[in-house]
């Protein structure tokens, strides 16, 4: 909780600093020259003529910023401590990257913004192939309500290329409020509406494309048509069409073990191929289902942002 008495942030309180920054009730004493060398916004502040009534703290000019204390702390650590916020594969966490993304955008430090986006890119992917292998390269640990937090961040920071998979994840629990730093939050209304509108089409895609392997018949090279057809029929009865939240899970992660038990090897391979084709088709359809620009447009925006432009 913020209090009225200021707190000196010890790891960002440099004795030879020449400016004191305040965010909420936290104070940071840092070198303006170092900040100005990286940020044109702080360079402009550095060039401002000192006014007579400039408020001072500890013999340094005091500048009060409207930012959140935690965001500013992480942003300043990234600026002054070169090991604090390295690009992937170094690990980070959502709060750190979100704060650095906000303030590196606001204070125009492209290399830090780019790093934050690269971290997000390890968990929210642009292609199904990357999505399937993301657990091996993710730099942001799982946490409660992560999809909602990223959806909000993408909305706030205008990162539309993240939205197709993120909104898909949000459909899991559109109406649920969630807690973030002791505050009850809920999804922003425009995204909530997009998710609700996408629900029925997602169920259809799940049934028609992703589960299409359940309706294969007389597969070429099958060892036993009757047995395999029966096995698939049993499975199809067990699968609920409304389980759209499983649509993007890979065949090996969800079905392979059970399918292998009820059909022959040839049918199992055909099932895996059909399931993958269904998931690929769904992945490509996601932007349209959420009223977003095409993947082609979104992938171009992503490439430009990750390149730091
Ligand atoms: Zn078979």
Image: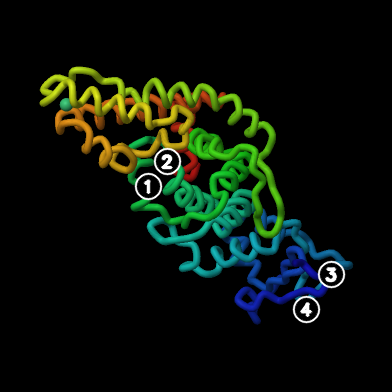
Number of the front mark, 2 or 4: 2
Q: Residues within 10 Å of mark 2 (few under 14, many from 20)?
A: many
Estimate the spatial distance between the alpha carbons at disc 1 and disc 3, rounded to whole Å.
Answer: 49 Å
Disc 4 Cβ-to-ligand 1 distance below 8 Å: no
Which circle, 1 or 4, is nearer the viewer?
1
Residue position for label 2: 125
Residue hosting label 4 = 59
Q: Is residue 307 left or right of residue 200?
A: left
Bin the neighbour count of mark 1 within 10 Å (Cα to Cα): few under 14, some 14-19, many 20 and up: some
In depth, the one of 183 and 288 nearer the eye is: 183
**First reached walking from the N terminus: tag 3 or tag 2:** 3
What residue sits 58% from the left and 56% below the top? 100
SS at mark 1?
A: helix
Label 4, secondary structure: give it: loop
Quarter holding the N terminus?
bottom right
Question: x%, y% of residue 161?
Answer: 50, 35
Of all residues shown, which one is farthest toward the top? 218
Q: Based on the displayed image, in which of its 4 quarters is residue 86 positioned?
A: bottom left
Q: Residue furthest right?
A: 53
**Residue 209 image position (x, y, % from top left):** 37, 23
Label 1 vs label 2: CA separation?
8 Å
Residue 64 showing in the rendered view: yes
Which badge, 1 or 4, is on the more N-terminal residue?
4
Instruction: Residue at 59%, 24% (x, y): give it.
Output: 197
Q: Are marks 1 and 2 in contact (CB under 8 Å)?
A: yes
* Mark 2 secondary-structure assignment: loop
**Disc number at residue 55?**
3
Q: Which mark is residue 36?
A: none
């Amino acid at each position: 909780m913020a209090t009225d008495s200021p707190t000196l942030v010890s790891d960002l309180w440099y004795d030879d600093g020449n400016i004191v920054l305040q965010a909420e009730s936290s104070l940071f004493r840092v070198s303006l020259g170092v900040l100005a060398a990286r940020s044109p916004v702080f360079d402009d502040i550095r060039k401002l003529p000192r006014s007579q009534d400039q408020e001072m703290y500890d013999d340094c000019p005091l500048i009060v910023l409207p930012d959140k204390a935690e965001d500013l702390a992480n942003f300043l650590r990234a600026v002054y401590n070169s090991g604090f916020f390295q690009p992937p594969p170094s690990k980070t966490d959502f709060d750190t990257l979100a704060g650095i993304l906000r303030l590196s955008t606001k204070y125009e430090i492209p290399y830090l913004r780019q790093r934050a986006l690269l971290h997000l890119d390890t968990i929210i992917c642009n292609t199904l192939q990357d999505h399937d292998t993301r657990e091996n390269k993710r730099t942001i640990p799982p946490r409660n309500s992560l999809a909602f937090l990223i959806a909000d961040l993408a909305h706030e920071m205008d990162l539309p290329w993240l939205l197709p998979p993120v909104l898909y994840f949000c459909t899991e629990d559109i109406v649920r409020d969630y807690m973030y730093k002791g505050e009850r939050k809920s999804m922003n209304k425009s995204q909530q509406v997009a998710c609700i509108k996408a629900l029925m089409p997602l169920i259809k895609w799940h049934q028609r494309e992703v589960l299409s392997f359940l309706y294969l018949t007389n597969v070429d090279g099958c060892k036993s048509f009757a047995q395999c057809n029966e096995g698939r029929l049993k499975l199809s009865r067990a699968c609920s069409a409304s389980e759209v939240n499983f649509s993007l899970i890979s065949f090996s992660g969800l079905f392979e073990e059970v399918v292998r038990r009820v059909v022959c090897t040839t049918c199992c391979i055909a099932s895996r191929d059909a399931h993958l084709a269904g998931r690929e088709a769904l992945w490509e359809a996601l932007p349209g289902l959420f009223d977003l620009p095409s993947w082609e447009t979104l992938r171009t925006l992503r490439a430009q942002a990750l390149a730091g432009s």
